[in-house]
Amino acid sequence: MKEIIKNKGSVYCSSNNWGSLNNKIKEVNPSKIFILVDTNTEKDCLPLFFKKYSFNESVEILEIPDGEINKNINTCSLLWNKLSENGADRNSLIINLGGGVVTDLGGFIASTFKRGVFFINIPTTLLSMVDASVGGKNGVDLGLLKNQIGTINNPEMVLIDTDFLKTLPENQIISGYAEMLKHGLIHSREYWDKVKSFDILKIDELENLIWESVLIKNDVITKDPFEKNLRKTLNYGHTLGHAIESYSLDQNKFPTLLHGEAIAIGMILTSYISFKQLDFPEQTLSDISHHIIKKFNKALFNIEDINAVIELLKFDKKNYNGKVLFVLLNDIGNHKLNCEVSNSLIFEAFEYYKKL
Ligand code: GLY
């Protein structure tokens, strides 16, 4: 069992020992237990969950439709009503069993219902294991704008079990891989090289690498839980990536991208900007770009698409007084926060991406 123990937000990783969940439920002693799933995890993960853990008490299942498009306040209203109708009180516990949408939205409804009830995250996607479920950020989208409404509030615990990854389609594994590559870029060349050379589809061998990513993220969020400075580095590639993701959700003529697919593009663009604006080495830019292009589908952006993406940047949560502020890199593992970037350089970065 791998573990990070904290007052709140402890993280455990194990596929054969769920004693940590048992201990936490005993400690919390909830009045009622709810399990939040989406249509996918109800079918693919809930049976495995019940194989691994049996409750002494009855539990209520709350189900939402899958997909980022449902991560909104309407879904929250439905869930708040269901909690209320089913007699949830302040000592209730919500177990979020799912990917980033379920853990983000479930964490938000738990943090706000009756001003906060207990919640536990059990991530079932790679993306959620290495990023979304850890660190206490939760919330929903506002229209198509990502994560505009939310709180920072840690779950009672996070339990990572890589057996859930066996239920995932390959594109979801690749999507989560983007966040691990990001951890490499912001942390160290050593971790970047390790993640880069790992065959991500070897799920049985993935646990140690996931844990290294969790340790990197944990180090950052422990130093800066409320994103005053250092935590912004976890947004590397996300300023453009989130805008690209929002744009892709809104357009019939543009393919809908998974979060990690959009972030992968954002990391190439941002590495190019880092090269042009700072001293980021050209050879490293080339290494990053070619590795990402090899692993992720390429998207085609025309001028209209790029203008729309740039327009969406004004909603980025790191903006200050109307200024869009990027996290750039001087080199792998060496960041620079709060960088302004001209639109012409953003266009140039898209041009570089197009030629890859
Ligand atoms: N996903 C970025 C963060 O947790 O800060």
Image (cartoon, rainbow, N blue to C red):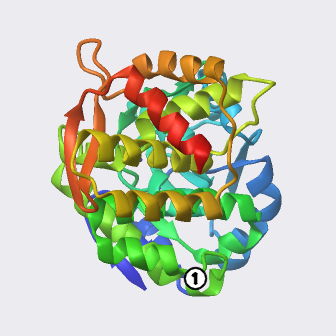
User: Which of the 4 image quarters holds residue 227?
Assistant: top left
| Label 1 packing within 10 angstroms: few (<14), some (14-19), many (20+) | some
> Vertical placement of 167 versus 199: above or below?
above
**Residue beneath the point at 67% across and 30% down:** 248
Q: Which residue is at the front of the view, 148 or 353? A: 353
Residue 19, position in %: x, y? 48, 80
Residue 221, position in %: x, y? 26, 53
Q: Is residue 255 visible?
A: yes
> Vertical placement of 219 versus 112: above or below?
below
Could you tell whether 246 is left or right of 347 in the image? right
**Residue beneath the point at 34% across and 49% down:** 234
Q: Is residue 91 visible?
A: no
> How many dots with numbers?
1
- Residue at the far top in the pictured view: 322
User: Which of the 4 image quarters holds residue 115?
Assistant: top left
> Vertical placement of 330 versus 301: above or below?
below
Residue 193, position in %: x, y? 40, 76
Could you tell whether 220 is left or right of 96 in the image? left
Query: What secondary structure is marked by label 1?
Result: loop
**Residue beneath the point at 50% across and 46% down:** 92
